[in-house]
Image: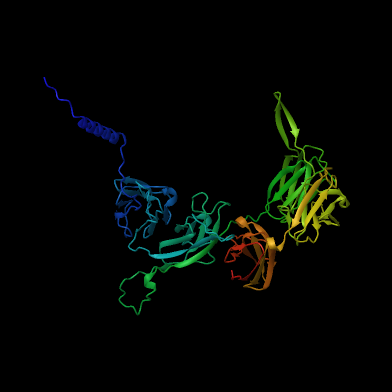
């Protein structure tokens, strides 16, 4: 029998086809699916229709072009006037059903602002700023009022706060009742109250800490308008006005709304209180009051110390007292603390720090030890030629010998001028006219200073040099004040608005800041019209707004060897 052998080329082609088929099965490729969907859902219809009148149901059904979901609706949804109970939401197909849980007011326009809570379920694209409005009466209110909420202290926009309108007008209503209208501020502090009825309203803003729409927490920030506000009508945009002579053509292209700027602040309780008593170091107490003290009283009860049992020092604002107790005779102390005979508190605390160390299965107490330490205002081994060097001690100095101190400039021995600037001898000033670019060496030998507790300083050496104009900047501001015979605090601010220096002016003048390190700076003004040297917050029931602040129009980028001069016409508050 004659057998034909297969053609070798055919076998090769069959084998190659099989390999290609296997490769295709082993490496599946997903379809691209087209571009990503960035389109938010669209509203196709609603029952009742948006902006309808004579609403008498307890349900609203909104149908969209695609399936939707709700995100963070409890925080995003703002209902005006507010409802006592949050509506119940469900989805059915492409429809969102809103079920109302309480009776509505008669003849009232309701506005439901959904924020960014409505999204599609595929890409979470939000239907930004969607609002649904209806009226329970025959008229749909259409007035509007807009504005901006900023921080009174630093002019920053306040987002997420409620701006409220009250139709019942008496001063304490924000503390007792929910508002009639409300809106929430956006990212830039802007707000807009829509569908308002005509009338005069009390306006109040609240960063609501407990979501009850009333001002009832001391930590809630507020703002208020000085006078009653009146909303204005929105001007309808017309494409073909019938009578262009009687209608302002500019008004036809825009929405006319009244605008209000509110300045937010946090009230301070005016009643003096003891805030805190704490142990700073062994036998050293910090006594902190809410406000600067006038006639402080600190009476030891147990043990009943007498005579000059302590040394006390105040901070700059006189709201904190540091108390050194050299011989307490006990590891704890019970005190009566008061100011001007008021806010009498009894406190008891330990006078020593103790920590438990575990050694060989037994607890052993070891006392934390301290020595007389001191800090200086020398930064990065540099000082300003026109400023003294300041040393701050950990405890009052009782004995010292400044003749032991050595100050040299390039190996030349100098005679330093030391002075304590306070009566308890905590802050030591070294006055000297530092020469630009010169290097100095300052040595405090061991036991130059002895503190109240008998501690002495260790031997300390400082090596520093004075800034030169070529490595620093100088800034001069020519100020024109809006109202004469008032105090204005001009502040130089560094990174994160850290206060570096300040000047107080009361007339048109120039102020200078010298030997500034290269960097970015801002200039702030505090309208200190009560002349107390600080920024004062407001008080709502006393109708006192917080003191005004303002900023120079631009950030200053100062460079080495620069002298910058700027004119600042400070605006009226």
Q: Is residue 35 above or below residue 368?
A: below
Please tell me in which quadrant of the rendered image residue 269 appears. bottom right
The quarter of the picture where the C terminus appears is bottom right
The image position of residue 352, as x and y in percent, is: 75, 38
- Asked whether, in this view, residue 430 is left or right of residue 477, the answer is right
Nearest the viewer among 288 and 382 is: 382
The image position of residue 367, as x and y in percent, is: 76, 35
Nearest the viewer among 403 and 5 is: 5
- Farthest left residue? 1
Nearest the viewer among 219 and 311 is: 311
- Farthest front residue? 2
Q: Is residue 456 above or below residue 292?
A: above
Q: Is residue 32 above or below residue 225?
A: above
The image position of residue 243, as x and y in percent, is: 32, 78
The quarter of the picture where the N terminus appears is top left
Q: How is the image coloured?
A: rainbow
Q: Is residue 353 above or below residue 449?
A: above
């Amino acid at each position: 029998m004659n057998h034909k052998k297969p053609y070798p080329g055919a076998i090769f082609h069959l084998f190659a086809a099989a390999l290609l088929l296997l490769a295709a099965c082993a490496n599946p490729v997903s379809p691209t699916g087209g571009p990503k969907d960035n389109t938010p859902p669209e509203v196709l219809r609603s029952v009742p229709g948006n902006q309808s009148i004579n609403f008498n149901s307890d349900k609203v059904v909104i149908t969209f072009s695609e399936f939707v979901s709700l995100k963070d609706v409890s925080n995003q949804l703002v209902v005006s006037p507010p409802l006592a109970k949050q509506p119940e939401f469900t989805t059915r197909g492409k429809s969102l059903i809103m079920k109302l849980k309480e009776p509505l007011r008669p003849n009232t326009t309701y506005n439901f602002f959904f924020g960014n809570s409505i999204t599609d379920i595929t890409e979470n694209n939000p239907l930004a700023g969607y609002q649904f409005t209806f009226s329970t009466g025959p008229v749909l209110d259409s007035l509007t009022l807009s504005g901006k909420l900023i921080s009174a202290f630093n002019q920053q926009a306040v987002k997420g706060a409620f701006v409220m309108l009250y139709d019942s007008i008496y001063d304490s209503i924000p503390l007792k009742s929910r508002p009639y209208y409300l809106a929430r501020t956006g990212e830039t502090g802007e707000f807009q109250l829509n569908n308002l009825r005509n009338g005069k309203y009390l306006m109040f803003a609240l960063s609501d800490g407990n979501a009850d729409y009333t001002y009832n927490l001391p930590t809630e920030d507020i703002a208020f308008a000085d006078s009653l506000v009146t909303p204005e009508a929105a001007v309808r945009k017309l494409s073909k006005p019938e009578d262009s002579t009687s209608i302002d053509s500019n008004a036809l292209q825009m929405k006319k709304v009244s605008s209000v700027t509110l300045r937010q602040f946090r009230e301070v309780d005016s009643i003096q209180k003891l805030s805190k008593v704490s142990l700073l170091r062994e036998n050293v107490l910090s006594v902190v009051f809410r406000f600067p003290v006038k006639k402080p009283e600190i009476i030891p009860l147990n043990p009943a110390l007498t005579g000059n049992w302590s040394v006390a020092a105040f901070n700059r604002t006189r709201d904190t007292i540091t108390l050194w107790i050299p011989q307490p005779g006990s590891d704890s102390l019970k005190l009566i603390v008061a100011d001007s005979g008021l806010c009498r508190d009894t406190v008891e605390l330990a006078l020593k720090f103790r920590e438990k160390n575990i050694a060989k299965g037994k607890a052993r107490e070891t006392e934390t030890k301290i020595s007389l330490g001191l800090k200086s205002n020398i930064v990065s081994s540099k000082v300003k030629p026109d400023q003294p060097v300041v040393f701050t001690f950990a405890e009052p100095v009782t004995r010292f010998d400044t003749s032991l101190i050595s100050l040299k400039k390039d190996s030349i021995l100098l005679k330093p001028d030391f002075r304590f600037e306070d009566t308890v001898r905590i802050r030591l000033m070294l006055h000297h006219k530092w020469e630009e670019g010169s290097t100095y060496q300052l040595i405090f030998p061991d036991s130059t200073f002895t503190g109240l507790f008998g501690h002495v300083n260790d031997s300390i050496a400082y090596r520093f040099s004075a800034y030169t104009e070529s490595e620093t900047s100088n800034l001069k501001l020519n100020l024109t004040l809006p109202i004469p015979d008032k105090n204005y605090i001009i502040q130089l601010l560094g990174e994160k608005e850290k206060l570096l220096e300040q000047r107080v002016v009361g007339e048109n003048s120039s102020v200078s800041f010298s030997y500034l390190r290269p960097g970015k700076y801002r200039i702030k003004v505090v309208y200190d019209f009560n002349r107390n040297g600080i920024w004062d917050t407001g008080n709502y029931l006393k109708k006192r707004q917080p003191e005004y602040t303002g900023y120079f129009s631009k950030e200053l980028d100062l460079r080495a060897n620069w002298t910058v001069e700027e004119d600042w016409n400070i605006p009226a508050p």
